[in-house]
Amino acid sequence: MKPFRALSLFLLLFVAIRPAECQQAAPAAPPQASTTSAVWNALAQPAMDPSHAATVKDLTLQRDRLKLTLAEGTLQFLQPVNGVVFGAAFRGKGRLEVTPPDPREAQQLRLFTKQDTLNLEFTEATITFTDHTFEEIAAKVQWGAVADSSLGELYIDRQRYREDAAAEILPRVLKGVFSADRRRTAYFATDLKTAEYGWLHARFDALSPEEISVGRWRDFGPRKEVEVWTSFPAGGRSAASAWNDPTGKDDFDIRSYKIDATATSGAELSATARVHLQHKASGERLLLFLLDSNLRVESVKDGQGTALEFFQPRESKDRPQSYGDYVAVVLPQPTQAGQAQSLDFHYAGKRIIRKVGTGAYFAQSFGWYPTKADSFATRADFEINFRSPKRYALVATGSKVDETTDGDWRISSWKSHIPLAVAGFAFGDFKFQAEKAGTVDIHIYANREPDDFMKSIRNQIDGSLPGEDTFGRPSVGSLSPAALTKTMAIELANTVRVFEKYFGPYPYKQLALTNIPYSYGQGWPGLIYLSALSFMDSTQRNAFGIRDHVQLTDFFRAHESSHQWWGHRVGWKSYHDQWLSEGFAEFSGNLYVQIRQNNKEFLDRLRKDRENLQGMRDQKNRLMESLGPIWMGQRLSTLDAPGAYSFLVYTKGGYVLHMIRMMMWDSRNPADPEARFIAMMHDFTKTFDNKPASTEDFKAIVEKHMTPVMDVHGNRRMDWFFNQYVYGTGIPQYDFRYQVQDAGGGKWKVSGTATRTGVPDNWIDILPLYIHQPKGAVRLGFLTTDKSTTTFELPLLNFKPEKLSLNANEDILAEIKQ
Ligand SMILES: [Zn+2]
């Protein structure tokens, strides 16, 4: 079930800055046309300014490493609003030049363009900005070119495209225009038409940790997105330092939520969310929130109950891509850094909850209350009161602190005891089962009736004969998820016990699990959504021809359960660090298979992972593993390699942690060979308890616990390892030869060579050397291979070894031939 894993999203990261809105700007409150709504309307319906057109020649706009040259042609600006000019269109001959700041970004640029330094001609361009672009150009040109009405059409065309692509540029411009600190909020975005690649998008956004980003607009099926070619911080900062404080550039922090929500049996959601925030920047008039645009905001009020103006994109309904998912809230007064504020959002809508069978609902957890886009790097307190149909159970993140009924309604209250990254809920006609894992309450909520997803699977195979299907196989029975509640409770409790041992205390008071009608899983704090497929028993899975049981059961449950540690107890600072969540969860799934099943199954899985990493190719027949380091995160997925993120970050990310585990394995301490690794993992979760961590943060923890053998350069650094396997690409192959000679006197001489190919000559591995005896393989030590051929000779042995091998426990992501 490969797609199963590929789809095993832990979360739907909203990485892309989602676009914009135009024609149907949502009604603003108060209703009278204010300055803000006048600007909004002008942004949404841009008009050309005939008095600001110019013929340009060799005009250069430089934004850090992004250089735009308008060699010759006509440039025309939009009409100013509130004294601010924010857009222009160009036709003629121009050139975009970008010099990547480091080899990693250069490698990415080459991958897409075959260029080391980007240098492309364009013939049309639109520029949208809130910085000094107008003043800069006005000082260099003479107004008076013949106004070109087609430039107005060009600008509007591109704006419409960006709205279709949910690029959320209009609210971003509105924010910049109304900011008192136009330098802090500077924004410069351009669409450029090229002969080779169609429309490109290049931008400088001072509010993003990686200010510079360049890519190409592409259609990913029904969705339009920018395929990012390069993205990096301005001013020569490293990505690690730019993301070290991941919310450092944010306008505000969200401290807590109080949400009163109603979920109906008609699958509607309505809510009032009170958001307590603290401003971090002064002089801001516009605050941007993320909220699913299927939820329509009726009002936003401040702490005094004053209705505030706000803007929302068009409703997306069942369109595969939204027009953006923002709520732009206009404050009557500019913000003061350090000041606390509360905002009440009142909203309602369909499609956030979907009815998926009799008594079965799927509640989309993301986007149902206003958040910042990067909520996984932050934590907030949640207090949620739900009204839901009395005949159904409801489960949410946090602990249930109260439950009453009121007529046909059930009213339940949920409170987080520590701040959470996200909050979610599920409700339906559930069978409930409780279990304990130490002090942790395990709660299973399983639908009594099969949901639509299970029914559709059953319909594909069910025959007419009672007791068997059309293929003569035994009937799969009722397919009720509720039938497996006891098993699920016991198995889930087991995962918690294993992970508490390896990773430290479970962070919450209980862990609830419910089935969802999809083939993936999602882990929310204290609440897991697991595919209905994993609620089938082995007879049912056999009937569907699903052979990979471990993948669907032990591995899958453990992967999702481990996200309580990876993602929730320890968050991630940026998209670069998401392997600390998905890779670690993959590692955890495999670890659980090793303990729950057996070592053979575990090693088979690792071998399969390695073979896939060595064999899987993208649509251009390039080895997936060569496309980029796992540190590139979601940028790995492109139109040519749509599954590269989930394949590489999961599989190779998991392998990286496995390699560290094996390097730390202490074969001289058979009673507790994992003591060092376990101490390291506990230290990691304790140091970053309920906080985000970065790759460099994790590397520092590894360095604190590393063994002398791992200290290849004698500097207490693991750069050699991280540079190769996390920040780089490549899988070495070793040709292993050895000789055993009778040295006389009952002694045996063992010597050999390991010859490496497939990676650069300066690659370094510490290769575990095993000796095979009748009782099994024992690790003798490590060969440090820092050149293409490494020779070794063991101290004389007083027995004749049966066999020697490298990497007997798939210790290292390397292929060994011998
Ligand atoms: Zn996951």
Image: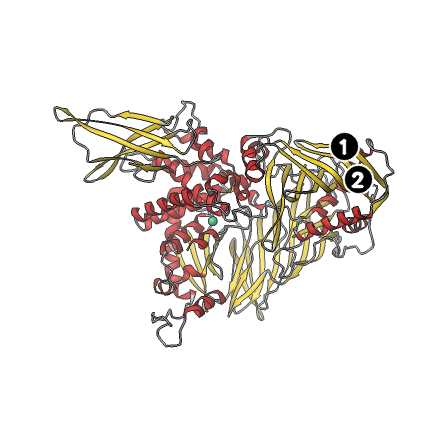
Residue type indicated by callout 2? Leu
Q: Is residue 393 above or below residue 166?
A: below
Residue 279 in sight here: no
| First in residue order: circle 1 vs circle 2 | 1
Residue at 61% from the left image edge and 57% from the top image edge: 320
- Determine the secondary structure under disc 2: strand
> From this viewpoint, is residue 159 visible?
yes
Residue 333 in the image: state x and y as whole percent: 77, 44
Q: Is mark 1 within 8 Å of ligand 1?
A: no
Say if 534 sits above or below 107 in the image: below
Q: Position of residue 522 (x, y in %)?
A: 49, 53
Disc 1 and disc 2 in contact, CB within 8 angstroms? yes
Residue toward you, 644 or 80? 644
Q: Amino acid at mark 1?
A: Leu
* Residue that numbered label 2 is attached to: 75
| Residue 505 in picture, x, y percent from top left | 42, 44
Residue 39 lies left or right of residue 96; in this view the side is: right
Residue at position x 83%, y 55% in the image: 32
Q: Quadrant of residue 107?
A: top right
Q: Quadrant of the N terminus?
A: bottom left
Q: Which residue is mark 1?
A: 59
Label 1 neighbourhood size at 10 Å, few (<14), some (14-19), many (20+)?
Answer: some
Element class at badge 1: strand
